[in-house]
Image (cartoon, rainbow, N blue to C red):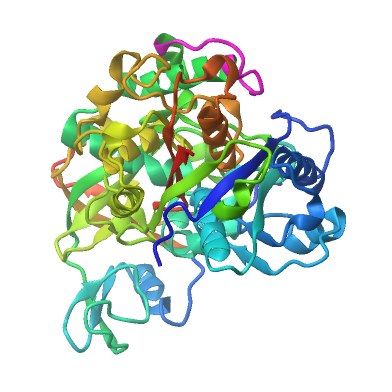
């Protein structure tokens, strides 16, 4: 069964994104976002009959959403524990569930007190996906995502000549978009020189190559496409979706080609399902836990050849007037770290024409990616229709 | 100095990986080898991904390696490593065809380039664990 255009994102919602949600719980934040997304779709909570939880370490479980929202008949519940690839994987999971007729309206929520609650940087030590590196690499002092991912960026620099200033281009453009968005943690302009002067976290990654720690939540509703037609919003169809896993998924150290992510396997599948090519994409929301991960994904998606990502991002190419507007909301780098569910929310708003000052004029075909753990990749291609 | 600093992460060995850690304590780097097809694999694990045999033995690595990539840690993600900052973590290609991640000794990151020859050494981490380290064959 072909999944293309069988499901649509019918509702989106989010909370304020801050460094400190004033003591509110992750559940409270997720309920706020969920209710906004359900109402945005023109639904009422009792019509939700599926829930997909994208985070393996979520402090919120489906049962609590059922209890608080008063969902009388949940027919489908699943998890997509792929770290930052989880939210986009959840779209595919939800689309499959509604296309199979198991349920009609699936709620996907993710929210955290990443800044004031359990710090995201320390979170991975408890995750089973990190067991291998926890045994063999952590004792030597490789302890955090920045330290696991930095050798990929260094390898890319050595093999292809990619520079830190090219990574800075991504941080600078993303910050411009966050300022336009308004609901963002980072609100002051950033220059390439600011980036180059920022302290090194794990060479070659500097402070402004790294994403934020945030308090906040986002939510979306995925509905069967034939049910979406009757709802409140213009339909945003899920035209192509795929998931891909890198070689040596448990340890980047042992990966034959350290410059290639799981997304490289997923991208051709999703483009083929949607019947479009990278040249058709009007706007792209690319998972940006670190600037380098954006650059690498642009290559793995086929926007440029492997090794040409540095040149591709130069000269404001990812800005609203550039060749490929990327992370029009400010991303994880400057809006908030909601594990990329905020990227999904933004893509839907772009395709509805609701993105405010950061709207890409006439955006009709868009793409959102997820990147998780040690290189898992997901993407969804959406179209207005 | 600060008595509240927690210890470094200790190798959490399983019965399947214990021989690797026991050998390091003796100054030997062991690699797991499939007893059926002879394929060397790292990190240690139960099954050969080529022939799916679960029988394995151990071979001692030659200690010859070359640089594949690296990072220089500047931020104290763990308080027990704060005093060692900055330290260089090298991803090295071992002569046996698998990779090793270890701290660099006797050289700075500025001397590194892919393909630079290294040799594996062994060092007590100060808290009772012996870990591999990497040194340039010709000190910089």
Viewer-side residue, A304 vs A334: A304
Q: Which picture quadrant has residue A205?
A: top left
In this picture, residue B125 sits left or right of residue B115: right
Viewer-side residue, B122 vs A304: A304
Which contiguous range is marked in magenta?
Answer: A180-192
Viewer-side residue, A364 vs A140: A364
Q: Which picture quadrant has residue A192?
A: top left
Question: Who's the residue at 51% across and 57% down the image?
Answer: A82
x%, y% of residue B101?
A: 33, 54
Is residue A188 covered in magenta? yes
User: Can residue B108 be seen from the camera position used here?
Assistant: no
x%, y% of residue A40?
A: 71, 38
In the displayed structure, B98 sits above or below B48; it is above
Question: Who's the residue at 14% across and 43% down the image?
Answer: B116
In this picture, residue A300 sits left or right of residue A225: left
x%, y% of residue A32?
A: 79, 40
In the displayed structure, A108 sits above or below A287; it is below
Is residue A194 covered in magenta? no
- Position of the N terminus of chain A, as image quadrant, is bottom left
In the displayed structure, B112 sits above or below A238; it is above
x%, y% of residue A281?
A: 35, 33
Viewer-side residue, B103 vs B113: B113
Question: Which secondary structure type mostly characterizes the magenta part of the structure?
Answer: loop
User: Can residue B80 be seen from the camera position used here?
Assistant: yes
Question: Who's the residue at 13% across and 42% down the image?
Answer: B138
In this picture, residue B7 sits left or right of residue B92: right
């Amino acid at each position: 069964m072909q999944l293309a255009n069988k499901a649509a994102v019918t509702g989106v919602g989010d909370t304020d994104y801050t460094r400190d949600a004033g003591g509110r719980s992750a559940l409270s934040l997720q309920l706020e976002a969920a209710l906004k997304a359900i109402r945005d779709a023109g639904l009422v909570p009792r019509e939700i009959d599926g829930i997909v939880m994208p985070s393996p370490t979520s402090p919120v479980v489906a049962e609590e959403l059922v209890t608080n929202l008063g969902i009388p008949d949940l027919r489908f519940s699943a998890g997509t524990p792929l770290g930052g690839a989880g939210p986009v994987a959840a779209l595919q999971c939800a689309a499959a569930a509604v296309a199979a007729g198991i349920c009609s309206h699936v709620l996907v929520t993710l929210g955290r007190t990443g800044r004031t609650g359990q710090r995201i940087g320390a979170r991975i030590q408890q995750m089973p996906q990190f067991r291998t590196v926890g045994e063999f690499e952590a004792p030597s002092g490789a302890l955090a995502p920045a330290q696991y991912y930095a050798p990929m960026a260094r390898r890319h620099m050595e093999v292809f000549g990619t520079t830190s200033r090219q990574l800075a281009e991504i941080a600078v453009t993303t910050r411009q978009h966050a300022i336009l968005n308004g609901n963002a943690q980072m609100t002051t302009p950033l220059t390439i020189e600011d980036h180059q002067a920022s302290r090194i976290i794990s060479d070659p990654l500097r402070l402004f190559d790294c994403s934020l720690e945030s308090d906040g939540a986002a939510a979306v509703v995925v509905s069967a496409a034939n049910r979406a037609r009757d709802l409140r919003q213009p339909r945003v169809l899920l035209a192509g979706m795929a998931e891909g896993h890198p070689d040596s998924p448990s340890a980047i150290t042992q990966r034959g080609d350290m410059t290639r992510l799981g997304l490289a396997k997923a991208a051709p599948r999703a483009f083929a399902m949607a019947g479009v090519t990278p040249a058709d994409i009007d706007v792209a929301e690319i998972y940006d836990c670190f600037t380098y991960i954006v650059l690498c994904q642009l290559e793995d998606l086929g926007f440029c050849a492997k090794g040409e990502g540095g040149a591709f991002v130069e000269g404001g190419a990812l800005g609203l007037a550039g060749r490929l507007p990327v992370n029009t909301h400010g991303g994880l780098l400057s809006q908030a770290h909601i594990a990329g569910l905020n990227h999904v929310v933004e893509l839907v708003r772009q395709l509805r024409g609701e993105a405010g000052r950061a709207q890409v004029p006439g955006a009709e075909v868009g793409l959102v990616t997820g990147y998780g753990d040690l290189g898992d990749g997901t993407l969804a291609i959406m179209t207005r229709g | 100095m600060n008595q509240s600093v927690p210890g470094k992460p200790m190798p959490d060995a399983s019965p399947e990986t214990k021989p690797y850690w026991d050998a390091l304590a003796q100054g030997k780097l062991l690699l797991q080898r499939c007893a059926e097809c002879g394929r060397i694999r790292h990190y240690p694990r139960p099954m050969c991904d080529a022939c799916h045999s679960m029988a394995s033995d151990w071979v001692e690595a030659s200690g010859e390696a070359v640089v594949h990539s690296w990072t220089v840690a500047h931020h104290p993600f763990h308080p027990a490593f704060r005093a060692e900052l900055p330290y260089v973590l090298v991803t090295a290609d071992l002569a046996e065809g698998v990779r090793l991640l270890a701290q660099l000794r006797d050289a700075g990151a500025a001397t590194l380039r892919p393909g630079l020859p290294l040799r594996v050494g062994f060092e007590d981490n100060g808290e009772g664990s012996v870990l591999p380290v990497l040194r340039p064959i010709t000190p910089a």
